Image (cartoon, rainbow, N blue to C red):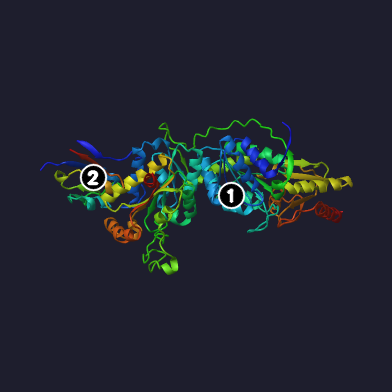
Amino acid sequence: MAVVFERTKGLRPVSTHYCPGCTHGIIHRLTAEALEELGVLDRAIGVAPVGCSVLAYNYFNCDMQEAAHGRAPAVATGIKRVLPDKFVFTYQGDGDLASIGTAEVVHAAHRGENISIVFVNNAIYGMTGGQMAPTTLAGQRTTTSPLGRDPLHAGYPIRIAEMLAMIPGAAFIERVSVDSPANVRKAKKAIKRAFEIQLEGKGFSLVEVLSTCPTNWGIEPPLALKWLRENMIPYYPLGNFRDKTKEEATDE
Amino acid sequence: MAAKGKVTFSRDLCKGCGLCVSACPLKILEMDRETINEKGYNPAYCADPQKCIGCANCAMMCPDQVITVERF
Amino acid sequence: MAKILMKGNEAVGEAAIRAGCRFFFGYPITPQSELPEYMSLHLPKVGGVYLQAESEIAAINMVYGAAGCGARVMTGSSSPGIALKQEGISYMAGAELPCVIVNMMRGGPGLGSIQPAQSDYFQSTRGGGDGDYRLLVYAPASVQEMVDYVQIAFDKADKYRNPVLVVGDGVIGQMMEPVEFVSKPAENLPEKDWATTGTGGKREPNIINSLYLDAEKLERHNIHLSKKYSYMQENEQRWEATGLEGAELVIVAYGTTARIARSAMDNLNKKGWKIGLLRPITLWPFPEKGFQLLDETTKHLLVVEMSMGQMIDDVRIVNEGKRKIHFTGRSGGVIPSTSLIEEKILEILERSE
């Protein structure tokens, strides 16, 4: 008999504060497994954001810094410039990265900063109680778009992966989802690849992970996965948007 | 029929979200309505261990790392 | 070592490099841009990194990340840029991260002017960021003193695990003066065993953080910080006193303004008046102990600032109603003249006779 799945050492042996069924837990696990499998836990420095995953510094089993809202890519830049041989990653939600922190992430990508970002997009502000996020879908009801997001008034949902993929300094950009076991496995592969890109010194890598917020969407966890599949994936298509290593291989 | 796999739940870590139940291809996982764990939830359990194939889909979807999977 | 002629902003950069600073995250703004310019040329020569951030906010957060790894790190800006950095400054104070920040003050509020001012006294000493925190604030009055205090600032930042602010103004940043770099042995500084450098598999993870969700834990943290600030108040006050004995009036001024005040004092003392000068070097902690040295003969304190009057609040606090307090100054980037100060002093003294 062989153990085929057990808790990763990349996470501390503690229970998280996340709501039941929140897929942050899955994405934490994938990130931590990638750190463990690549053997970088003891030289990793992670940066936690502000938002639901603000307490990520209590969960990842490596050195961590807690950044101000949206500033994780700047903090990670400071870390990486001091310790270029260490592994540096940020874990950020959509309010943090796609709203208040757009300048920081766009410029980190333009600098080709050799860091990796796990970007969790659940189309809402969870921590503050379900307000409209930059990623909230058109028509989606939130506590600050009670009649549904009207793009003519509140603008259009922002597609981060597509936007960052146009940046010359970005080496690896992919969007994945955690709505099914098969997609979770793909997400793991993408996160691991993004981390390898940093270890190879290739530059900026980011994986956008479509995620759920059962509590603030007001949908039971299994049905929230279905909602993600039916509503988010059509607007936020899955796939690789940039892989410099493949482009270079083709060039040769 | 002999089980091909085995799932073990760290019951007190479970938040009763049911994602494992919906992910199981054999529909052998259920929420234990008779038990309330330390966190105050009805935890998930395997109602028919003999049928488990050890696919780990449940563990793949569990946000709280409650499940250990073994395969024979 | 022989003295060399250097521009203030560049001398600050050289002093920082000599103090072991190897990382500078900057953003251009007049009148401090020669500092990032100097660092961009000279830091790489010593194996350091200069990086131009996309904004002052990004720059201070890069400083946060670098300081969290235990590096000696610096950023510089001028008034509105320092306003933007307040977020990171508060976070660094909360997370107890050492760094040195230079503010070459210009006229405000808002975009203000690009000429010299001292109107960031409140911003410097009251904290522009959120929460119960303090910065150690040095206000040198010459290029040489800037050089000396930049070195001291790095040591104090490490000693207290606290951001240290060095404030100058457009005059000190832009003028050239002869300077000598004398490297002093650093204080016996504590090991940075809290830094996030990777666990190396040898210790539990280190966490750099200013979040305490439990109110009582945050209160305990604030009490800990407060004790540190009290210790700084007791041990870090610095000032320069001139001619206090028998003085009828003492001018209180810092930085560039103190230099002008000194000329005014000398002019009047030559005419037989008894004028003294008390020059705060630390704006926080405010040099309360310097005011205890004031003579019984001193009935008047004249505060001179390049602002509409900000430090005067601290003078009122330490004076405890004992002496009459007066103010003169210019603002918006206008530098007060010696005659403005002399006329004000004569007006005060002649009226009280």
The kind of residue on which mark 1 rests is Tyr
Task: Give how far across and how far down residue B38 sits, in percent.
Answer: 29, 46
Q: Nearer the viewer, residue C179 or C224?
A: C179
Give the position of the C terminus of chain A as an image quadrant. Answer: top left
Q: Which mark is residue C103?
A: none
Q: Which mark is residue B56?
A: 2
What residue is rendered at 24% in x and 39% in y? A4
- Label 1: chain? C
A175 versus C140 height, above or below: below
The kind of residue on which mark 2 rests is Ala
Relative to residue A4, is residue C166 drawn left or right?
A: right
Mark 2 neighbour class, 10 Å CA radius: few under 14, some 14 to 19, many 20 or more: many
C124 versus C201 height, above or below: below
Q: Say what secondary structure mark 1 lies in.
A: loop
Relative to residue A171, is residue C246 drawn left or right?
A: right
Q: Nearer the viewer, residue A39 or B57?
A: A39
Which residue has dot 1 on it? Answer: C27
